[in-house]
Image: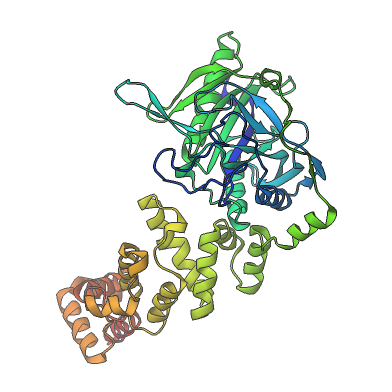
Amino acid sequence: MSKEDYEVVIGLEVHAELSTKTKIFCNCSTEFGAEPNAHTCPICMAMPGTLPVLNEKVVEYAVKAGLATNCSISKDSKNDRKNYFYPDLPKSYQISQFDKPLCNNGYIEIEDDEGNKKQVRILRIHIEEDAGKLNHNEFGGGSLVDLNRAGVPLIEIVSEPDIRSAKEADQYLRKLKSTLEYIEVSDCKMQEGSFRADVNVSVHKPGTPFGTRCEMKNMNSFKSISRAIEYEVQRQIEVLEEGGTIEQETLRWDDVSGRTFSMRDKEDAQDYRYFPEPDLVAIKLSDDYVENIRKTLPELPESRKARYMSEYKLSEKDARLLTASKYLSNLFEAAEKICGNAKAVANWILSDISRILNEEEMEPENIPFTGKELAKLVELIDKGTISSSIGKKVLEELFACEKDNMKDPEEIIKEKGWIQISDEGAIREVVMQVLEANPQSIADYKAGKDRALGFLVGQAMKATKGKANPQMLNQMFIEELKK
């Protein structure tokens, strides 16, 4: 049997670190990148006799995430102890939430593989503390424990098993990441582990019960998640086709070999021996508390997309791509507000800026320039000061600048001598030289081959190093060719 004879079932458990200044149960800093164990205290190191105190900002951010993902908010919630032993979990239990999470029954809308709108249901969003981190000695000399991350607040967003392909999983994760960035509850820096996913995959034949699931832990790359899903689906189908059975287990994805490897048997809820956390009181939320948080929600991607289509007359595709990233969307709005050319700004962001981001494997939030510089670039092209081809070079220069040492686009073109040639006499001289050097192209044009004009303009642009005004070139070539 082929892959098409099986249905893929995927559920995702996403952990997002919250952007609070302090940890969930103590006053230690959550800042990333400090020296090992610099941000620790007796509470997050689990010293005997210490007691946790819940950070109210954690509850606020979790409720905000629930409202932004269409969840109902529980007015009566509590914390629980999740018991498991691991070297970087000093208490030997994690304070989490079990049967009374803060948020329930939400959804995120994506498109299925056929392009139809589809809701992926969110079962729950709950708060919990992060564990520490093991730094392994690459020469096999043991591991050192860094507890800076221990106690950093997390929300865990658990989807229902509604996802049916790697493509749908990618869409869901990108939409969820974008939503959390818009509401500013998490920076979602995947390279720092601020946004990571546990991926549950199973396969079954349509009409039969769901298959046994396997889980791939702590994945923090969209590309790796898609590859891992594709591999695991194929692996499970091959096992079943050969008459084997799928064991419920936790797997490790190896990005280099492109394979999954078994780590341990997959735990069930009973293995964690949950019980209510005795050192923390229940969480009681009033209607006013929830509504006040709802009022602070910013414009979310869907409504911003609709506004872009209405206000700026952008296509559905362009509006969707722009609003998929809060940072690109904000860059667009800042630049458009200055130069008033929405279409040109959108084109620069969706073409050359996005291309450079992909080539450099850079996140949009790391773009060094602001809307001010992008607007200036658009204005310089609109005024005819530089051509679009020179504009691409200016953009490369802007990307090469440091954020705190940003150059003005006008300063760049003066330094580089890139100001567009719009002098009629100078351009006509270039046109005549190109025509004299290309008699065959003249004959081709007169024979009805319109492509010859493009070739001649290209030669003139090459001769002027992209500085000639392309509109003037076109016009002059046509005038001369008609003589």
Q: Position of residue 39 (x, y in %)?
A: 48, 43
Q: Residue at x 32, y 73 (%)?
A: 407
Q: Position of residue 146 (x, y in %)?
A: 44, 34
Q: Can I make out residue 10 in this image?
A: no
8 above or below 123? above
Residue at the extreme front of the image, as rendered: 49
231 above or below 468? above
Q: Residue at x 46, y 71 (%)?
A: 371
- Report the front residue among 95 and 361: 95
- On the picture, is 339 further left or further right than 458? right
- Report the front residue among 389 and 479: 389
Residue at the extreme right of the image, as rendered: 287
426 above or below 231? below
Quarter location, residue 351? bottom left
Residue at the extreme top of the image, as rendered: 243
240 above or below 332? above
